[in-house]
Amino acid sequence: MTQRINGEGKSAVPLNALLSDIDNILCRVKSPFPLNFLSKIEFRADGCWMWKGAFGFHPRHRQHRYGEFKVLNPLTNKRHSTTAHRFAYQCVHGPVARSLDIDHLCGNKLCVNPEHLEAVTHRENIQRMYDRRAK
Ligand SMILES: [Zn+2]
């Protein structure tokens, strides 16, 4: 797994603190992050985990591009696509109903840090989008 610490912007967080942060999250996961998932993340000093892998269109918000990750379904032995941030969230919090959106609390659409994500209803997600724009 490659770790790149972004030197720009808010880099006041010491490397040790950042790594123990990542460690704290990883030790709580329900299903381990696969190595081919972790290797596509740039762990930034501001706490955001920036997705560096493939992109796709979000199934519900066609205008937004999201990180895309292909997961192998062990039952069917077929790979299916999911959004990278939903995958990360589910690794830590367990399965989330398809009807729920995963909102980015940090506003960074390419961030896959489970601590920056929250499962909300589509209505709530849209409301938050308007609230953030109004600010
Ligand atoms: Zn973030």
Image (spheres, helix red, strand yellow):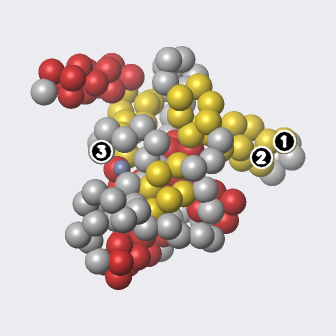
The residue wearing badge 2 is 73
Residue 101 visible, this angle: yes
Looking at the image, how many numbered discs can be counted on the residues?
3
Identify the residue at horizontal 63%, vertical 47% (top origin).
53
Residue 103 to residue 117: above or below: above
Spatial distance from mark 1 to mark 3, Cα to Cα? Answer: 33 Å
Spatial separation of the CA atoms under disc 2 and disc 3:
30 Å
Q: Position of residue 127 (x, y in %)?
A: 25, 21
Instruction: Give how far across and how far down residue 22 sits, in percent.
Output: 42, 70
- Residue for badge 3: 106
* Residue displayed at 32% across by 20% down: 126
Marked residue nearer the N-terminal end (1 or 3): 1
Say which label, 2 or 1, has the lower sequence index: 2
**Viewer-nearest of labels 2 and 3?**
3
Q: Seen in the image, is 14 located left or right of residue 28?
A: left
Amino acid found under the numbered disc labelled 1: Lys
Are the residues at dot 2 and dot 1 in contact (C-beta closer than 8 Å)?
Answer: yes
* Residue that mark 1 sits on: 78
